[in-house]
Structure formats: C-alpha cells, structure tokens
Image (spheres, rainbow, N blue to C red):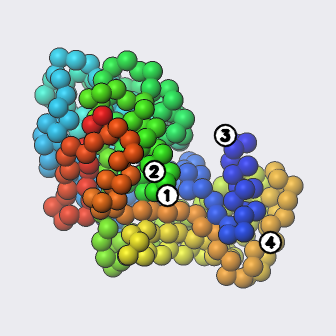
Amino acid sequence: MNATFKNDVDLGLSAPTKYLPSKYFYDKKGDALFVEIMNMPEYYLTDAEHDIFKNQTLNLISALKINKTINFDLIELGAGDGIKTKELLKTLKQLGFKFTFIPVDISQNALNNLEKTIKKELPYISMNTKQGDYFNVLEDIKWFQKPKVILFLGSNIGNLKDGKAKEFIHKLSLALNVNDKVILGADLIKPKSIVLPAYNDSKGITKRFNINLLERINRELNANFDLNNFKHQPEYNEKEGIAKSFLVSTKKQNVEIGALNKTFTFYKNERIHTENSRKYNDTIIEDITKVSKLKIIDKLTDSKNYFADYILEK
Ligand code: AVJ
C-alpha cells in the first residue's frame, strides 16, 4: 500500500501537469473529514440520495427483483458511514430477505467504524468487511457463489474519468452472473450555483480535506510541504458537468520528499489536480454502461431531481 502511494505520488508530481490520485484522500483524518463533508449543508449529494433510500425503499427493493427464498450477497463498494445503506438493510430484513452485507472500502479505518455502528444499531445483520481498491476487489468477488446486489453509491463513480468508468463497469459486469443487480448512484448535472458550493463550503472543510493529501505525504513519505503555501481551488464547468479540485502553489517553492529522495519545484500559481467529481445525465450513464453486459432497468430520483440511483441488471 505504502509502496504504491509512494510511486503514485512520484508519478503525479513528476508529470508536466501535476496531479495526485483522489483515492489517497482517505486516511484516518481524510475519512473523518469526509464524514464532516457529508454532513455539511452545501454537500447536497448525501441528503439527496438519502431521500431516495429513506422514502423510496420499497420501490428500490422491488426494482431489484430479488428472490426471497435465496440467500444473496449485498456488496457495497466504497462503504463510507453507511447511513443510506442502513435504510435498505433494515427494510430488507423486515421483509424477510436473506443476505450477507459485505462493505468494501480502501480504508480499513472506515470499515471498522462502519462495523461498529452496524453491530450496535442492526445487530441481526450478517456482515463481512473487505478492505481494498475497487478494481482489485472485483477480482475476488467474481468467485462468490451467491446472487449479488452491488451498491456503488454516493456518485463514487464520479472520481473516475469516463474511460476508466467504462472499464470499471465492464470489469464489474464480468464479476457478476446473469440477473445480478447494481445500484449505481450518480449526481446529476445541474447549475454551478448548486454544485460549486458543495466543493467550496463556507467552513473550509473541503479545503482541509484537499490539503490533507499534502499532510499525508508529509506524514507518510517524510516530506516538507508547507501547508500555508497551497490553497484550495475548486472549479465547475456546467457544460462538461465536471467539478475539479486543485491545490495551487501560492509562490515558487521547493518541496523535499524524503521517501523518494527527491525535490519537487512548484512555480507560483502552479496547480496540482487532486480530484474530478463528474456529474451525469442518462446519455452519459448509457454511454458508460453500453460496452458492458449491464442493462439499465430502472432509475429512481430524489424529490429535487438532484441525484439518481440507476438499477442495472446483468
Ligand atoms: C466520494 C467521490 C463522491 O466527489 O463528491 C467530496 C468526494 N470530494 N468533496 C465527491 C468529495 C470533495 C466525493 N465522492
């Protein structure tokens, strides 16, 4: 894990246009900041998808067309704090469905937190956690024997460029059997006045989340980033439907990364691209899924029409 982090940091900061992969946001501190992000008023995504899971639980379950007599695996990719999923777990159990909940996350810390809350609040749920990168985990779940329902919520797919997202959906479909289902959460394209504040909140939580990536490099790779010399810069292009986050060097500076034995130079106003958060419409989702064997069989949206959960079937 640390070896790939080190290599990825080296690759990204040596590139002509500097970047860092957004998956490295999620260390212990990043997990806690992301929970804060999900709770802030500007971050409408969580409330919108929660609205679907809370107020349309029965529609969601019937769209999945699950056979009540057969045990299935409910596998969540990128589990987070589970607030939305708990609505589904509770209702499935009440209705007498038989399943094992398998949350997957890159962060073992996030999985431990989730396991604690589920054990406390829904002790009757059978649960196995799995740590790993989404792409790698697909290789393992391919061999699971039971029918599967995959949850890929929160517009987590939005961190992937469309090409990567296609590849991911294709790989996901290869890990599934005929009739298996996917709930794919996608934030919908909407005006900048709504999207941008979600990535530029008034309390500066997103800024801390972004800057934590540099702090993590300082901590884990023995680097000397001066955090005061970088600022958080979010952008949203409404036409493209992509929110992008950058860290901007406020002056010319050198940064040493001990673990790499290298010095990196940042020019004044030079940017490090740290994240893409793609927004969607039906056409984009159709394009991303069409190369795979997954068919869109249903779509649920929240009351404000901000967010959609697409139901895919193999
Ligand atoms: C977890 C990838 C869905 O892109 O909206 C939140 C992460 N980044 N604020 C998103 C995030 C900055 C989030 N996803």
Contact, mark 2 vs mark 1 (Cβ under 8 Å): yes
Q: Residue at x 49, y 40 (%)?
A: 134
Q: Is residue 55 visible?
A: yes
The x, y position of residue 208, in whole percent, is 54, 66
For numbered disc 2, what is the local secondary structure? Answer: helix
Q: Earlier in the sequence, mark 2 or mark 3?
A: 3
Work out how far the residue at label 4 is from the one at label 1, CA to CA, in angstroms. 27 Å
Which residue is under mark 4?
265
Q: Earlier in the sequence, mark 3 or mark 1?
A: 3
Which residue is under mark 1?
161
As shown in the figure, which amino acid type bears the numbered disc 2? Answer: Ala
As shown in the figure, which amino acid type bears the numbered disc 3? Answer: Met
Which residue is under mark 2?
165
Left or right of 70 in this view: 195: right
Work out how far the residue at label 3 is from the one at label 1, CA to CA, in angstroms. 23 Å
For numbered disc 3, what is the local secondary structure? Answer: loop
Q: Residue at x 46, y 57 (%)?
A: 162
As shown in the figure, which amino acid type bears the numbered disc 4? Answer: Thr
Q: Earlier in the sequence, mark 2 or mark 4?
A: 2
Which residue is under mark 3?
1
Q: Residue at x 72, y 56 (%)?
A: 11
Q: Is residue 199 visible?
A: no
